Image (cartoon, rainbow, N blue to C red):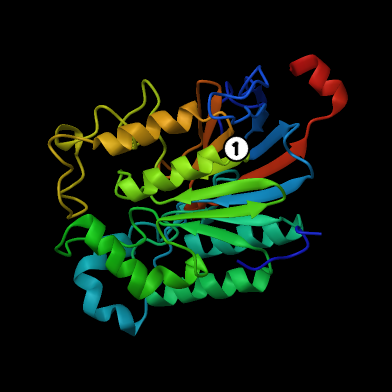
Amino acid sequence: MKRRSFFKETTTAVAGLGLTTVSFTNTPDKKGVRPVKVCATMDQEKVSFYSDSIKEPMKVVHIADTHLFTDDERGIPYQQYSGRMAKAYNETFHFKTGEKTEPKEAFAKTLAYAKEINADLITLIGDIFSFPSEVAIEWVVSKLEETGIPHIYTAGNHDWHYEGMEGPLESLRDTWIRKRLLPLYQGNHPLMAAYDIKGIRFLAIDNSTYQINEEQLAFFKEHLASGMPFVLLVHIPLYAPGKGVGFGCGNPDWGAKTDGNFELERRPKWPEEGHTQTTFEFHKKVFSAPNLMGIFSGHIHRNSIEILKGKPQIVADDNASGGYLDIDFLPMRNQDKSLIF
C-alpha cells in the first residue's frame, strides 16, 4: 500500500441523521477491549464519523459497484461468459443530476474528486468490474496510481465471475483473483487484510460468495481482540431485520428458496441449508464488537443505513451511476462530548 502524507440520493429519513453512539460506557469488556464511542451523521453521500478515539482528521472516498465492462482482444475467448454483463451498464444516469453517464466516466470523475479534496484513502469495495476483464483491471490500476492516493480493494460477486463458467464459486474466485485481480491487492491477502491509517484499522474482508470462511472469522476475531478502533469493509451488506436477500451476509432467509437469480447469472444455486454457522457467527461477532466504529459496503446499488446494537452500517449508491461516499473521520470536540457522551 502506497503511503502518503497521512503518516506525518439517500432517503429524507436518513439525510442529516445523527446516529446513536456505539457505546455509552468506557468500561472494558471481559477481554479488556475498551468500547469505542462514535457519533455518525449522513447527508446524501456525505458521511461524518466523530469519536474521541480519532486522533486526527481523515478523508475517505468510498466506491462500490462501478461495473466497468471495457474489454479487448484478450477477452474474446471468454465472451460466452461475459456477454450479458458486457451490455448491462453501457449507459447509466447520474445519481444526482439524472444526466446520461457511463461507468468509466463515473469512476474517473470520482477519482478526480478524491484528488480534489486531498483524500487520505480510496476504498474500492467490490463490483468495480462486471467481469474480470484484463484491460479494465489494468486501466483501474493505472488510474489509481495516477492519483497518488492509497487504496484498499476487496472483490464483489461480479469482479471475478464469468457467468456460466463451471466450478464451485470459491474455486472460481481464487482462480480469477490470482489470474487477473491480484495487482489491486498490493501484496496483501485477497480475502482478508488489515490497513492501519491514522490510528484507525480498516479490515477488508471478502464476502463476495455471501459467506465467510473459518480463516476469515479467525482473522476477524484476532483484530477484534487487538482493541484498536476499526472499520469493516465488505461488499455484501450484513443482514438487518426486515432487509431482503441483497443484505445477504448472515441473512436467515438466504438460501436456495430465495435465490431468484441463479439462472440469470448462470451460477450454482445458493445452498439448500442456507448460511454456514461460521457466517452466522461472523455476523454476531461484528455487531457485538466494542471497538467497531462502523461498516461500509455496496452491492445493492442504492444508499442505505442500518443500525444494529448501535453499530452503523452504511451502503454506497452504485458508482456506475456516479455514486460514492465522501467520509470524514473527525476527533470529537470537547463541547460536543459533553452533549453526546
267 over 10 or under it: above or below: below
Where does the N terminus fall, quadrant-wise? bottom right
Q: Is residue 259 left or right of residue 308?
A: left
Comparing 270 with 110, the one in front is: 270
340 over 281 or under it: above or below: above
Classify residue 191 by image quadrant.
bottom left
Residue 41, horizontal then vertical, whole percent: 67, 29
Q: Is residue 145 left or right of residue 74?
A: right
Classify residue 37 by image quadrant.
top right
Q: Is residue 265 left or right of residue 38?
A: left
Callout 1, which amino acid?
A: Gly
201 over 147 or under it: above or below: above
291 over 92 or under it: above or below: above
- Residue under pointer 1: 227
Q: Residues within 10 Å of mark 1 (few under 14, many from 20)?
A: some
Residue 261, horizontal then vertical, whole percent: 21, 44
Q: Residue at x 49, y 68 (%)?
A: 184
Residue 227, horizontal then vertical, whole percent: 60, 37
